[in-house]
Amino acid sequence: MKYISTRGDRTPKGFSDILLEGLAPDGGLYLPERYPQVDLATLERWRSLNYADLAFEILSRYIDDIPAQDLRRLVGQTYTAEVFGTPEITPLKQLQPGLYLEALSNGPTLAFKDMALQLLGALFEYELARRGQTLNILGATSGDTGSAAEYAMRGKKGVRVFMLSPHQRMSPFQQAQMFSLQDENIHNLCIQGVFDDCQDIVKAVSADLDFKRRYRIGTVNSINWARLLAQVVYYFAGYFQATTHSSQRVSFAVPSGNFGNVCAGHVARMMGLPIAHLVVATNENDVLDEFFRTGTYRVRTSTQTWETSSPSMDISKASNFERFIFDLLARDANQTAQLFGTAVAQEGGFTLSPALRERAAGHGFVSGKSTHADRLRTIRHAWAQWQAVIDPHTADGLKVALEHLEPGVSMVVLETALPVKFAGTIVEALGREPDRPAALKDIEQLPKRFEVMPVDVAAVQQFIRAHVQVSAS
Ligand SMILES: *Cc1c(COP(=O)(O)O)cnc(C)c1O
């Protein structure tokens, strides 16, 4: 299987080549040259597999430059009951007949990003060892992504993480999660500023090409194809649990921000998984809902991007969206480059023709949005009706899912985080603290490891220099 860029670069690249890369050189995103097709007989055969074996079957159709026995081992070591809490890895919980939550948040950081990043950590370690290389991951976080990346890379050989976060601005729980890691290859840099300052420093360091090359600086951002691919697996796993035979169709409701999670659903559907609808749920930052309702994609400025109580969905543009548009345009790279390289860059967006809008609906997408009031109401409803405590992001998904129920089609709502991560909103909705997994009871009391630094690019570079040995090459 070879990978191509959404903007036309057709230099054939294998999975391992794009694993450690971000954007394609022409600014596009990588996609496989075609989607492997899964027929009914194969689906019926996969139905009885455990999660790791299912993951191997799916991944091996996209990865042909890692020996099968190695890939099987990496996947088997990643998706274990010890790491994800149950042998099913992503168990379904029935709310009422035909309506389910799929638990994607029982990994080490209690959010669905662990599903992909845990595998990415294993793949990075494997590929770097094979190449005799090292990588220094530099990132900025206001919470979720940073901790998922650190828990994925902790103790991994050949990888160091330098994670910038705004000093004293994350919740005590989030700080405890990240700063209690004692692994030597994990570095928490607390910047005396806001999240944007952290992000600006990361951009400045990455723009210093000399420094970037010399210190082998990389990222784990959400456009990485391997992350998306890992997420395809739980659509299959959820589908099998919600059905008894692969002639049945299922819809998925997905709390969405950067369009990474629901894009994996699109890939699963393109492979032949019988998905009726992909329900895109946004919060007040409704870039995606607006697109699916009107055909207009309009990137927001930072002053038009709201801070909400489902903060991991607070986005101004949807980084993975270009992948879907490329497929929607029947993989016309010139047109994709025109829309994203020109129209988005110069005019802040584009509007599709009515014919293309119709074609988007043909890909199964529907959408809706949810506000803070909706979120509180949905959290209360889930508790009163089903004795389920759900987090604010999952509540956005459930709210929009309930607007799209169809007779005879089961609806699976993806649970993207556990409520304990967003205790403030749970207290506001239910008047009580959410339960905490036993292993995290006293996490705030653990010793913390972090470095406080000014908003200063040179100081961050100096810190990296002091903690990285430059290889001879
Ligand atoms: C990242 C995140 C999302 C959004 O996922 P995308 O892939 O960016 O659409 C939703 N919920 C939670 C809890 C997240 O951490």
Image (spheres, helix red, strand yellow):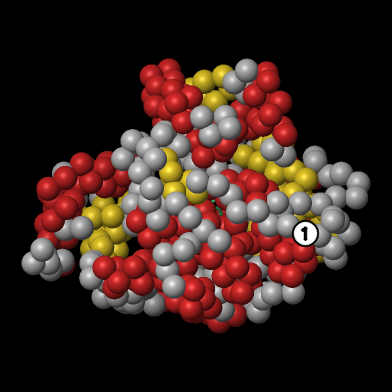
Residue 92 visible in rendering: no
Residue at 13 percent across and 56 percent down: it is 214
Residue at 12 percent across and 48 percent down: it is 210
User: Which quadrant would the C terminus be assigned to in this image?
Assistant: bottom left
Which residue occupies the extreme left position in the image? 472
Residue 54 visible in rendering: yes
Badge count: 1
Some atom of ligand 1 lies within 8 Å of the CB belonging to the residue at label 1 = no
298 or 241: nearer the viewer = 241
**Horizontal and vertical percent for residue 124?**
36, 66
Q: Is residue 73 above or below residue 356?
A: below
**Horizontal and vertical percent for residue 181?**
36, 73
Q: Is residue 261 above or below residue 348?
A: below
Residue 179, quarter of picture: bottom left
Residue at 65 percent across and 47 percent down: it is 270
407 or 326: nearer the viewer = 326
| Residue 216 shown left or right of residue 290 in the figure | left
| Residue 125 shown left or right of residue 337 in the figure | left
Residue 218, quarter of picture: bottom left
Residue 11, quarter of picture: top left
Q: Is residue 336 above or below residue 131?
A: above
**Horizontal and vertical percent for residue 386?**
82, 61
306 or 394: nearer the viewer = 394
Task: Label 1: state its secondary structure.
Answer: helix
Q: Amino acid at mark 1?
A: Leu
- Mark 1 is surrounded, within 10 Å at the Cα level, by few (under 14), some (14 to 19) or many (20 or more) other residues, namely some
Residue at 20 percent across and 47 percent down: it is 205
147 or 375: nearer the viewer = 147
| Residue 314 shown left or right of residue 429 in the figure | left
Residue on which disc 1 sits: 40
**Horizontal and vertical percent for residue 163?**
31, 58
